[in-house]
């Protein structure tokens, strides 16, 4: 039951995050295509962030699936993850309104980096609670995908000041990597069930 | 349990969408009927969009009712549906603030069209997962109502540039068609139960 | 399960409504008591509306408690109730920003009147579904409290144009009447259980 | 089931509160570090408030865990707690936009004080309902931590007008005290289970 409430609260926060992002797309004054034009970069950022938040929700869903008991560290690691995700609307708006300028693009990557790190912390908190031999610990293994994402984000933060389009390309690449929910967990769970 | 969380998350997102739309109705400065007048078209758009989002929630409820297992494609098809629904507040505000001008009216139809298409994709993802002989596959059959709605939306997008009131009339018509939750599914479910 | 999702969705919508109302209290520029002064009437309206939405949530909770099966009319009656409640932030902001002027005060009463009517419709939809001899039908009886509230709201709408403080006093009175959750339903349920 | 809905509603409200606070961080116009600078104090306030709301959610979670039956006073005590928490975004924005000036800092403490008091009231309502010998009553005992927090808040409100940084330091201190979820309840529950 404890776990249900943690999931319900996380779902609520993520649902609000993913939806208030759309408020950064301000309704334009005019009624022609020219009036829509300045909204376009904000819209593209919104699409990217929607995919990222969707990925986090999907992975969160899979991660919590393996949890049987929630303790204090898991709760705080989860809140910490939600904190960094809650900053996504702000950096999305800043990057979109400024046509992917260097600093907004770098800050966007920084928030994603911190959210990725927070996801790792949450995994560690769960493994610490359930033991190294738990389903999750086996499934995550050396956790290549999570660590590679962090490397890519760090790379994109630096590249934002050199060529911001390269940074944006990396964000798209990471989104593509994570698009498919974590098969390792699904596989380990079904192995475990046999 | 997986399915419960998908429903809970969708409910959260749809609840936020349906409620933040009301924020597009800006509190007017004056205190007489004249001050309320510019709010009226936004209010009418809000009513229309509230009905559409309500219809989607109702149908989503019925559709998920038939699902027993959630997989990756269903999750992403569901997020894709939520994405297009999340754009409804933006197009509602744009259409309302511009007194149903041609382009905002057409864009409103486009978002509804894409949401309708996304609903179809979600149906396909569920049928693909549960097999052609499942309750849902039988219930949907040739899925006339969904396809007719898409045709009507496409028609309205074109008509918006000819006579925008005709386009709005079509939106009302589609809302009326979908007002009653999908009896086909209810019927098939009770047949199945016998 | 159907009922659970109706409750979850309603909870989500009401949670968003009750919380976004606070956004009508704009953060003032100055840092002294004078800067806070214009926020005060909006705050008072917020308190009143918070109590009303809280009452609706409480009564909704009690009403749905008696429901065993959800059908189409109940779903739409519920959405209709949520629609009128969703307008409360708008009228709260308008009344608060205009220091309880006549028309905003009357419109506030009108939205409460319509929400009260919508609650009655929802009761009827539930009784129609569950039969005249159901727990709810017996509990509601002639439904004096609901009808008296509607009378009071209608009175307040008229009085707003004569003396708006009388109208506000009536809103306080109705809030006081409903403050205690509906004992009739609780009593009937425990009688039923014996 | 009644309790589940109280939890779900509270989770929804708290999820919206914690997320709309981020909207007080307005997207800046420029794209350099100078443009971000005025956002920094709002960001720091946001972090502090996020932690406080997180603490309240954690403690709420633990408190409700001990509840078996929800009655009217518990419902209203819970709504009262949510009311004061709903004001946190407003005072967060005011304090952040004014660089921790005296009155905003004091008002921030006042809202936290009232929320702390409301949490106490909720505890009393639950103990009153479940009896002095219940798990919760034993766990809370003389409730030192809750009362000390209130004292600290009162102190900070006064100190805000003398040295506002001292007031802010006290807020950090209280956050640190409550950071760990209430072990007393966890301990009493596990003793009870033996």
Image (cartoon, coloured by chain):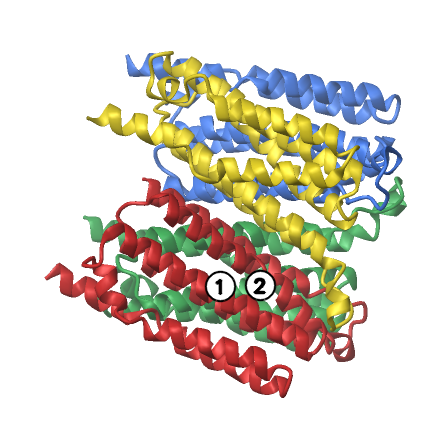
Chain colours: A green, B blue, C yellow, D red
Q: Is residue D13 visible?
A: yes
User: Which residue is at the front of the view, A132 or D44?
Assistant: D44
Circle 1 Cα neighbour tier, 10 Å, few/some/many (<14 / 14–19 / ≥20): many
Q: Which residue is mark 1?
A: D115
Provide residue D41's location: percent of width, then percent of height.
Answer: 67, 77
Q: Give the answer, above or below, for where C87 lies relative to A113.
A: above
Q: Quick check: marks 1 and 2 in contact, CB under 8 Å?
A: yes
Side of B156 relative to B57 (left or right)? right
The image quarter containing residue C28 is bottom right
Image location of residue D121, percent across then percent down: 40, 59
Question: Is disc 1 placed on a helix, strand or loop?
Answer: helix
- Which residue does the numbered mark 2 point to in the structure image? D88
**To which chain does the residue with label 2 belong?**
D
Within 10 angstroms of label 2, few (less than 14), some, or many (20 or more) residues? Answer: many
The percent coordinates of residue C48 (x first, y second) are: 61, 46
Quadrant housing the N terminus of chain D: top left
Residue C94 horizontal side relative to residue C118, left or right:
right
Name the mark on residue A116.
none
Q: In screen coordinates, is C27 left or right of B129?
A: right
How many discs appear? 2
Which of pointers 1 and 2 lies earlier in the amino acid sequence? Answer: 2
Q: CA distance from mark 1 to mark 2?
A: 9 Å
Q: Chain of mark 1?
A: D
């Amino acid at each position: 039951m404890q776990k249900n409430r943690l999931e319900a609260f996380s779902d609520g926060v993520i649902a609000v995050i993913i939806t208030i992002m759309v408020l950064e797309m301000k309704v334009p004054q005019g009624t022609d295509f020219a009036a829509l034009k300045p909204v376009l970069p904000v819209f593209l950022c919104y699409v990217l962030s929607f995919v990222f938040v969707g990925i986090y929700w999907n992975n969160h869903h899979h991660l919590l699936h393996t949890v049987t008991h929630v303790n204090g560290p898991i709760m705080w690691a989860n809140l910490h993850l939600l904190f960094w995700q809650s900053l996504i609307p702000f950096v999305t708006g800043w990057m979109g309104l400024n046509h992917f300028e260097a600093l907004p693009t770098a800050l966007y990557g920084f928030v994603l980096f911190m959210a990725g790190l927070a996801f790792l912390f949450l995994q560690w908190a769960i493994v610490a609670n359930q033991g190294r031999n738990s389903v999750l610990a086996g499934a995550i293994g050396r956790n290549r995908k999570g660590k590679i994402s962090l490397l890519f984000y760090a790379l994109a933060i630096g590249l934002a000041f050199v060529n911001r389009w390269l940074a944006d390309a990396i964000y798209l690449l990471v989104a593509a990597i994570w698009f498919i929910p974590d098969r390792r967990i699904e596989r380990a769970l079904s192995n475990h069930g046999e």
